[in-house]
Image (cartoon, rainbow, N blue to C red):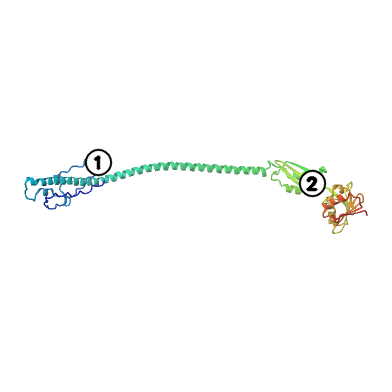
Amino acid sequence: MKPPPPPRRPRRPQGVTPKPSEPEAPRPVEPAEKPVVRRVSATKRAKELPTVKPELLAPATPEEGLNVAALAEPEAPQKTPSENAPESEALASFEADTDALAELEETRKTGSERGLSAWPSRIKDSWHGWRQKRGAKNTALIGTSNELGLKIKERQRSQRRRIMWSLGGTLAGVLLLVLVVWLLYFSKVFGLQQVSAKLQPETKPEWSAQVVKIMETYRNQPVLSLDTDAMATEIDRLPFVANSKVTTQFPHTAIAEVEVRQPVALVPHEKQTLVVDKEGVILKYLEPKGLKLPVIQVEMGRESTGRSIRAGLKVLDGLPPEIRSEVRYLSVPSPTNVQLHLGNGALVKWGSPDDTDFKARVLKTLIQRHARVYDLTSPVAPVTSQQ
């Protein structure tokens, strides 16, 4: 509580001169008793303040108050009652002011002492109140922190469970994948069990058996990891095979599609006749007897013999079927000079095997004219003659 302000000095009445008095020594201030800790409102405390009697008022110094005893001794000469009436009233008013001043001073001192004595209790009360508030706050914080800690622990346990489940699922997935890969690509569960061969065109049954025998060597191998290229390469080594392709069907089947070499011409060589296909491969397994094929006549023993045979075969392969069936033989003196001899005795001067398709279309048109010689060495300007 804020102490009251110091009292103002009372006004001295006119005509009254106070007698100066000797200053008294200041009274020692007794130590205040240990205050009782209690809280009292300002109004109630003001009511409880003691009333100080004027006769007990004794200021410590002349500055703090006036000497009432000095005021009682008149210094002025005796006057009549009528003359003393204003002075009496002034003196009475001064005494009343002095009493009020003394009471106010005592109230100030008592209030200050009480205020000073109440400060420790106030500080203690404030400290206890702050401790209680802080304790409540700390309790709330502890409760909140405990709840937060429980939530964090629960979240951590949930994360650990989720991690363990994910690791377990990943491990199970990896193991399952490894098992599936092993079953499909390395085990005999889905191994090769059924094989078949399709030859185009259909020929001797023993040739199909030879193809199947090669495929049987791959039995029990996983179908998905079967080396079909290696199997096709082995099949291509057979003399009657021109080309082959192997396909698989899950879970146990493999099929080989084989293109058989077809004879297209006969080539006389010394005392025998050789059967060749469109690529010039000699088909030793075929007998020339009974084969109605055009004959390619070349001069053997020269460096260009092989190229001459290939040139004649290229021309035969590019002819339309209706014209090829009319060809009796081909004479090939050189790789750039191919001549066709037809069954009706006509001669076709083909020239080089270049532009075979274009020359074949031109010959198909010219052959409708009866002639002895058809010159196609220059297909853009063909020539026919009767000689």
Residue 277: percent from left, percent from top? 83, 50
Looking at the picture, tell me which residue is in the foreground, 92 or 210.
Answer: 92
Looking at the picture, tell me which residue is in the foreground, 138 or 113.
Answer: 113
Q: Mark 1: which amino acid? A: Thr
Which picture quadrant has residue 211? Answer: top right
Distance in Å between CA atoms under marks 1 and 2? 126 Å
Disc 1 marks which residue? Answer: 43
Residue 263: percent from left, percent from top? 84, 48
Residue 126: percent from left, percent from top? 30, 44
Disc 2 marks which residue? Answer: 259
Q: Mark 2: which amino acid? A: Glu
Quadrant where the image shows the N terminus: top left
Measuring 86% from the left and 47% from the top, which residue is drawn there? 322
Quadrant where the image shows the C terminus: bottom right
Q: Is residue 193 left or right of residue 111?
A: right
Measuring 42% from the left and 42% from the top, which residue is drawn there? 146
Tag 1 secondary structure? helix
Relative vertical location of residue 248 with respect to residue 281 in this rendering, above or below: above
Looking at the picture, tell me which residue is in the foreground, 377 or 296.
Answer: 377
Q: Residue furthest bottom?
A: 303
**Res. 96 visible in picture:** yes
Query: Which is more foreground, mark 1 or mark 2?
Result: 1
Q: Residue furthest front?
A: 82
